[in-house]
Amino acid sequence: MKKEQKGITLVALVITIIILLILAGISIATLSQTGLFQKAKEAKEKSINAQGVENNTLGEYENAFNEYGNY
């Protein structure tokens, strides 16, 4: 009787992991060369600045409404 094979072998698993690591390394290198990480940092800073401006504007509107309500 032949032994029935189940699952994958350790060699196939190791080869799959190595291929995934190579692909991850290539993609990280590509992303860092295109400056995508730097652009993301700049976008975050711009978003924070815009949020501050929006909060100031809303505060000014709230003050104006409060002054109008006092008349």
Image (tube, rainbow, N blue to C red):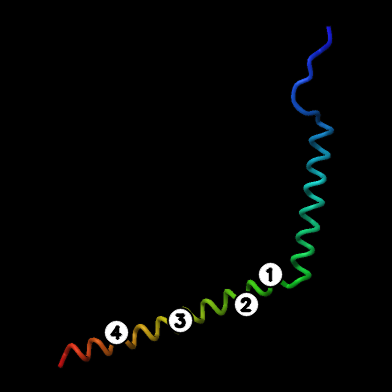
Residue at coordinates 83% horizontally, 39% vertically from top-left?
15
Residue 60 position within the rendered picture, expressed as x and y whole percent measured from the top left: 34, 88
Q: Secondary structure at mark 3?
A: helix
The kind of secondary structure element at disc 2 is helix
Marks 4 and 2: in contact by CB < 8 Å?
no
Residue visible at 62% across and 77% down? 42
Q: CA distance from mark 3 to mark 4?
A: 15 Å
Instruction: Tell me how far mark 1 sits from mark 2, CA to CA.
Output: 9 Å
Q: Which element type, helix, strand or loop, lies under badge 4?
A: helix
Look at the numbered discs 1 and 4 and tell me whether their residues touch, using CB distance below 8 Å: no
Q: In the picture, residue 55 is in which quadrant?
A: bottom left
Amino acid type, residue under disc 4 in the picture = Glu
Inter-mark Cα distance, 1 to 4: 37 Å
First in residue order: circle 3 vs circle 2: 2
Q: Are marks 3 and 1 in contact (CB under 8 Å)?
A: no
Which residue is tagged 3?
A: 52
Which residue was labeled with disc 2?
42
25 up-or-down from 50: above or below: above
> Which comes before the other along the chain, label 3 or label 1?
1
Residue wearing tag 1: 37
Label 4 crowd bin: few (<14), some (14–19), many (20+), radius 10 Å: few
Q: As drawn, which residue projects farthest toward the left? A: 71
Q: Which residue is at a point 40% across and 85% down the rendered structure image? A: 56
What residue type is disc 3 on? Gly
**Percent from the top left, x then y, of residue 53?**
45, 84
Q: Which mark is residue 62?
A: 4
At a point 16% along the width and 90% down the height, the residue shown is 70
Q: Quadrant of the C terminus?
A: bottom left
SS at circle 1 = helix
Dot placed on the residue nearer the N-terminal end, 3 or 4: 3
Q: Earlier in the sequence, mark 2 or mark 4?
A: 2
